Image: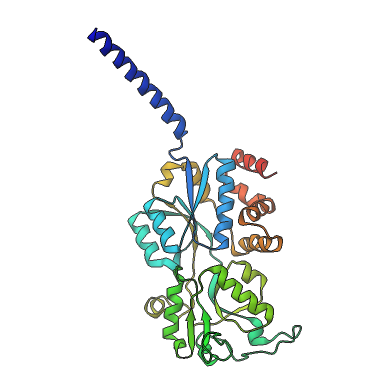
Amino acid sequence: MKKVIIFLAATLLVVLAACGSETGSNNDSDKGIDTITLADAGWDSIRVHNSIAQTILEEGYGYDTEVTSGSTAATVQGLRDGDINVYMEIWTDNIKEVYEEATEAGDFETVSVNFNDNVQGLYVPTYVIEGDEERGIEPYAPELRTVEDLKKYPEVFEDPEDPGRGRVINAPSGWAVNEAITEKFEVYGLEETMNNFMPGSDAAAVADLVDSYEAGEPWVGYYWSPTLITAKYDLTLLEEPEYDEATWNETKATEFPPNDVVVAVHKDFPEQAPEVYEFLQNYETSSELTGEALVYMDENGVEPDEAAKWWMTQHEDLWTSWVPEDIAEKVKDALQ
């Protein structure tokens, strides 16, 4: 009787092992990964590029996707740790030390340059310097040219919560660029007359700028391109000394360095999803192309995913060049 029980038990184990092996094969779908996680560090252009990539990944390659939101520091760490698989917009020089450290350590891999024709710094509405005859606005600070000049104009950019001092809108505190602006405050002596104001979010900074612009009032603060704001409004970038690496590293007292905005993946991703890795190696746009989607979002009141799909219908020749023909056909069918 014992021999029969042992035989039946052994047989059952073999059957269960076979079933488990078969089930595991179905779940893995021979891909090594089922859900691809992308980073959202808090601005619209990365959300548009995420949506473009997600449409191709889901409709073309059959992957599930999800997005992890957080500050630049948190999402880059997530990429290093493998909690995030793909980062569609790493502004390399904004996080130069961390980027170089992670790259040298092999924690993640840069696969392509999304765009490199972007600019960033402290902007004012152009009417602050030149006026606007159509709107009946006289120049507020016709001699304003440089970031350092700002300390001469606290009354023009008056802080509503601290009369007698000016206000410069920095980037949100969770953003890497915030520290660079803060260092510029010290080296240019802006703290003598100006307050370094950190908005709670990009949306708060934008709302402050738009309210001032629509009212024809002075405003100064950090922004960058490609964005809806720089595409839609007439803004002037305040000048700084030409970029010099040694000076930048020591004091930040130059214009922002050239900034490749790259697509990066976690170190394990090339083996987990080699066909997607190959697609991302071909991913390349520009500030102008990205700005088109951002303007469409604003003018039509849509979310980044809808803007991304519109963008893909407008630039089919571009994105179809990133993927094999059979994948492109699946995505095109889904977009119809």
Return the x and y of residue 313 as percentages of the image width and height.
69, 50
Residue lying at 40% horizontally and 23% vertically, measured from the top left: 19
Q: What is the residue that sits farthest to the left in this orientation?
A: 2
- Of residues 169 and 266, the one nearer the viewer is 169
Instruction: Work out whether residue 226 or residue 258 is closer to the camera in this orientation and state it.
Output: 226
- Eyeballing the image, is 112 above or below 93? above
Between residue 277 and residue 307, name the one nearer to us. 307
Residue 319 position in % (x across, y down): 61, 50
The answer to whether one can see residue 81 in this image is: yes
> Image quadrant of residue 123?
bottom right
Quarter of the figure that contains the N terminus: top left
Q: Residue at x 67, y 63 (%)?
A: 298
- In the picture, measured across the screen, residue 50 lies left or right of residue 30, that is right
Does 2 appear above or below 202? Answer: above
How are the colours assigned in the image?
A: rainbow
Please report the residue visible at 65 percent of the width from the left and 59 percent of the height from the top.
293
Q: Quadrant of residue 80?
A: bottom left
Vertical order, 60 against 117 (above or below):
above
Asked if residue 253 can be seen in this view, the reply is no
> Residue at the location (44% across, 34% down)?
28
Q: Report the label total.
A: 0
Residue 330 horizontal/vertical position (percent): 63, 39
Q: In the rendered image of this protein, does residue 166 appear above or below residue 99?
A: below
Quarter of the figure with the C terminus = top right
Q: Residue furthest top?
A: 1
